[in-house]
Each structure stands twice: as C-alpha cells, then as structure tokens.
Image: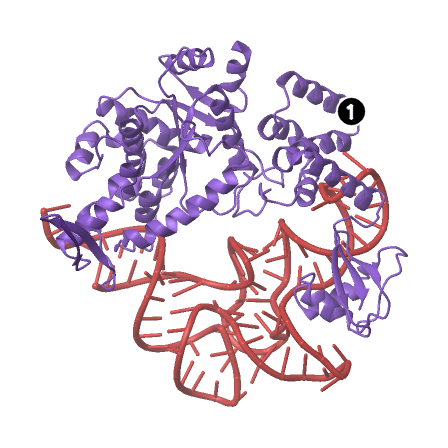
Chain colours: A purple, B red
RNA sequence: GCGUCGGUGGUAGAGUGGUCAAUUACAACAGACUGUAAAUCUGUCGCCUCCGGGCUACGAAGGUUCGAAUCCUUCCCGGCGCACCA
C-alpha cells in the first residue's frame, strides 16, 4: 500500500507541494481506514469544455486513483471567473439562463468524465460553480418575461403570489433558489463580498502576484497587465476557501504545471482566511500527437476520450517514438518498473518500436472502450495498414445503379467538395479496395457493388439497391 | 481623448492600382517509400464548371477608377506612444 501511495504522489507529477507533509499522512491513514473525515481534492474546470482529451485525462486518472483510496473529488466549474475573463465583457449577467447553460455543459462534461472518475457516488464526487459565491443579488438581471412566484400561506390558505422578475423580492427568490450550496445541504450559504475580497487581498502583495512568469514576460515585452488578470489567482484561491467552507476542507488542489502559481495562491488565500492551506499537485503536461506541443484542442493534436476505438488506436500509433515512454507514464496504468523496461528496450533498439506503440495504443483504448474494443481496434489497424485490407467497421451505403461516385462520396461526407474529389481522382487516390484498381474517370458511375478506398484511411462500401 | 502602426486564406506572415485565388512557412490532403497515420522525397491545397471559363474572398460599408487586397471616406477591432482623470 505504501508503495501505491508513493506512486500516487510521484508518478507523472511535476511538483507536489505538501510542506507540512500532512496530505501524505492523511492519505496513508485514509488508505488504512483510519481517517474518517473527507479528503477533499479540488480541480478547477472550464465551464465550456465539450471534448475531454487525453491531456485532461492525465489529471482525471490521477483523481480516479485518489478516489480509489477514498478521497472526494470536487469539480470547481469556473463560470464566474470565465465570465469576467471574457474580453467581450458582457457585463450583464442573466444567472438563471447562464446557469442552465453551465449546468448543461457541466453535465456533458461529467458524463464524459464518468468514463474515468466515479461520478455517481456523492461521497467521492461533487461539483459546484464559483458563481455560487461570487454572484450577488444585485448582479442579477432577469428577462422581463421571466415568471417568478412564491407560495404564501396565510391562515392555512396557500396562494401563489407572482413577482416582477427584477423587483427586489423577485431577485431574492431567484437568488435563493439558484444557490447550489443549498442543494448540497450546507449549513450556511457562503458568499463573497467586496469586504471579504479586500480582507483576503490584504494578504497578497503586488510583487508576489506580478511575479508570475507569464506576467513578467508580458511586462518585459512592454505589454499591458490588467488588474482583473492579476486578481485571477486570488479568486481561484478564494474558490479553495469556499470549498473548504462548504465541504469541510480543501486538502489538495490538482492541475497542470501551468496552474502551479494559481494553485499556490490558493494557499495564501486560505491562510488569510484562517483555513488549513491546501497541498498542491501539478501534473506533467502530455504532449500532443505532434510530440512537441501540449495536447490541446486549439492545436488540434488531441485524442478525445470519446474518440471511437479505431480512431483512438490510430492516433496513438501516429505519435513520434520519442514520446512513447511519456505516454505510458501519463496516459496508462502500466506499472512503473514495466515502463522502465520499455524505455530500456526502446533505447537498445531491440524491439520494433511499432510493437511497443501498439501495446501503448491497446492499453489506452482499453481504458476508455474496454479490452474487447481494444483488441478489435488493433486487428483493424493491422489489417488496414499492415495488410492493407478493409477495416471491419467500414461505412456502408446503398445507392441505385448509375449513381455518380462524386455524389455518393460527397453526400457521405468523405470529401468536402467536388473540387477535392476531382483532385483526388487526379492524384490517383481513389481505388477499389480489393483489386487496387485506380479509378481515374472523374465522372465514374457506380454499376456494381464494391468497396472503395480514398487515400489510406477513408473507406466506403457501396451496394447497389 | 490625441497621435501612430496594423486587421490578408486553418495558422503565422508577404503583397501596396492590372501579370493576385494572392509569394513563403507551418498545418492539412494525396503519391512514393517505410516499422505505423513516424521520418524523408514529390505533388495538391477557395467553390462551381458543359474545362472555355464563371463565382466568392484580403476587418465592415460606401466611393474613385476601364480595373482595387492595394487609393479615398466613414465605421468597427487590435498593438504601441502620449495626455487627461484619480
């Protein structure tokens, strides 16, 4: 058990800040069933993230391991901070509507996360938005047609009383009803006021906040640094305070290495509010498919955890050999000594790196789609790319005889335009999958059922009605 | 607010009246090769086409001109400098 815990706090970890050693101690006790309180671990998440990829998964998988020891994971949806950070600066807040939106996003997010984390058990998982304590009654601005009513009982008779949405009472009702903390059954509602914010700010200094590398780079480059950007770390810190108030404690915050500064600010904010400061764990960043850039949606070099098993397998196979060990370390559950072994093999050039990568791909697919799917994906990959035959899950379409190939392929979304089709024809990229016979006629029509191949990875099996 | 420099295709970034669907690099796609969708080399890379050409596009809207990404006007957005306020 001790070694598991050790691996839990070292593997793939960039920095682990636990000055009092208290977190590790709690963890060890928890593992032995001797720590009755919750160990609360915070992860800040973006309110608008539809696609979770393996980069996020590094953190999620770590969290899952913490859950397995019995820790409670809190997703902190930074909807408020995202809103003020928004350069569009939509000052008006329409909480009910936005919250419905945020809730929906959070739900799809949590659904995806459910592949990794245990999200069903309230003892092990919970989530909350930070607008819950950062938004005040006066921030509300409700649409005029919004219906607000309250059951009022007088002399044992109950009636629904309607209120104008932007009246004080109307806002108060919405405010009260939209508190997530209330649903979590917390004893009191924690809310941050200007007073509270300033109190916390007394413990921060300008030099420390502007010390952040990112800020320094910008200042040196003659760029601007806005006040609200400087306050970001403080607000995130206050989130930790809020979590501690709502859930009893906030023992650890986890994030990517790029979040280290912000997470450390949380410690200061907590100390300022006389709360035991959280420990901080930052995890190594997983490189993307190109092997150099950080895996991210904007670089389009990511493997989404919702990717189909075949795509996922193929994408893993496309990573450069150099990052194989990193992927094993960060994206699989392969034991550490096993990884050392793999690194050794790669270094000695004894085993074909392709085979090692295939194992990597298989393990990664298995995490998200199961062993069975991983096996299938591998078989498909081998047959498609090594033996150059048709994959099993080829897209199928039925057309009547005489239909133009362009139309089929276009309507099936295999090419984006007729121009692209013409190009592919010119390049000799379209061929019969079995006979390898190249189709070179731009106006080729479908007369018999056949399976066609466009390039290396696009397949379509066409059947005559 | 004043001044100044900018806003170009998926991204970066040339182009400053016709030869511009727009140099180049990256990304992407295809072909060859291979150990894989790696690397490398070659090609393609707005849309439509009866393959003659047509249409749409260089922040937005107008204008000048035979002709505008390129010149003018207004507007929107961004960088930088200065000032005002505190």
Q: Residue visible at 21% across and 37% down?
A: A192
Q: Is residue A194 above or below residue B60?
A: above
Q: Is residue B73 above or below residue A34?
A: below
Q: Position of residue A37 (x, y in %)?
A: 35, 18
Whether residue A364 is visible, yes or no, is: yes
Whether residue A420 is visible, yes or no, is: no
> Element type at marker 1?
loop
Number of numbered labels in the structure image: 1
Q: Which residue is mark 1?
A: A349
Q: Label 1: few (<14), some or many (≥20) within 10 Å?
A: few
Front one among A236 and A207: A236
The chain identifier of the residue carrying mark 1 reads: A
Q: Residue visible at 48% across and 23% down?
A: A66
Q: Is A339 positioned to the left or the right of A42 in the image?
A: right
**Residue A447 occupies quadrant:** bottom right
Q: Position of residue A441 (x, y in %)?
A: 83, 71
Q: Is A403 positioned to the left or the right of A285 in the image?
A: right
Quadrant position of the C terminus of chain A in the picture: bottom right
**Residue A42 occupies quadrant:** top left
Q: Is residue A207 above or below residue B45?
A: above
Q: Position of residue A262 (x, y in %)?
A: 36, 32
Q: Position of residue A77 (x, y in %)?
A: 37, 40
Front one among A247 and B54: A247
Q: Is A240 positioned to the left or the right of A336 in the image?
A: left
């Amino acid at each position: 058990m001790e070694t598991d815990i050790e691996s839990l706090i070292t593997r793939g970890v960039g920095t682990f800040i636990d000055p009092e050693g208290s977190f590790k101690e709690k963890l060890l006790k928890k593992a032995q069933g001797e720590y009755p309180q919750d160990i609360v671990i915070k992860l800040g998440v973006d309110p608008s993230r539809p696609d979770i990829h393996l980069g996020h998964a590094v953190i999620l998988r770590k969290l899952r391991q913490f859950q397995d020891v019995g820790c409670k994971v809190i997703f902190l949806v930074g909807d408020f901070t995202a809103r003020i950070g928004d350069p569009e600066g939509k000052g008006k807040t329409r909480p009910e509507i936005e919250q419905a939106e945020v809730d929906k996003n959070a739900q799809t997010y949590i659904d995806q996360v459910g592949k990794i984390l245990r999200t069903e058990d309230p003892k092990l998982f919970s989530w909350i938005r930070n607008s819950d304590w950062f938004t005040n009654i006066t921030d509300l601005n409700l649409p005029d047609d919004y219906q607000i009513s309250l059951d009022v009982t007088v002399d044992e008779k109950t009636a629904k009383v309607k209120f104008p949405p932007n009246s004080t009472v109307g806002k108060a009702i919405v405010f009260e009803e939209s508190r997530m903390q209330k649903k979590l059954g917390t004893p009191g509602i924690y809310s941050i006021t200007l007073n509270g914010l300033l109190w916390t700010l007394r413990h921060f200094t300008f030099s420390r906040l502007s010390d952040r590398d990112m800020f320094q780079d910008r200042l040196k480059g003659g760029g601007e640094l806005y006040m609200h950007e400087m306050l970001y770390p403080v607000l995130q810190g206050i989130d930790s305070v809020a979590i501690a108030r709502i859930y009893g404690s906030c023992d650890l915050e986890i994030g990517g290495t790029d979040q280290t500064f912000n997470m450390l600010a949380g410690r200061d904010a907590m100390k300022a509010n006389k709360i035991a400061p959280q420990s901080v764990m930052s995890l190594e960043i997983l490189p993307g498919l190109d092997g150099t850039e950080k895996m991210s949606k904007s670089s389009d070099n990511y493997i989404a955890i919702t990717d189909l098993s075949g795509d996922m397998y193929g994408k893993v196979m496309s990573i450069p050999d150099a990052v194989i060990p990193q992927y094993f370390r960060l994206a699989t559950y392969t034991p550490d000594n096993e990884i050392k072994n793999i690194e050794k093999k790669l270094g000695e050039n004894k085993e074909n790196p392709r085979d090692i990568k295939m194992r990597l791909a298989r393990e990664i697919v298995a995490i998200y789609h199961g062993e069975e799917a991983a096996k299938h994906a591998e078989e498909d990959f081998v047959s498609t790319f090594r033996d150059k035959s048709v994959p099993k899950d080829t897209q199928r379409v039925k057309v009547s005889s005489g239909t133009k190939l362009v139309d089929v392929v276009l309507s099936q979304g295999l090419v984006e335009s007729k121009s692209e089709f013409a190009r592919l024809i010119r390049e000799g990229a379209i061929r019969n999958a079995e006979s390898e016979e190249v189709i070179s006629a731009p106006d080729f029509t479908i007369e018999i059922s056949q399976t066609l191949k466009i390039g290396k990875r696009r397949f379509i099996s066409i059947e005559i009605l």
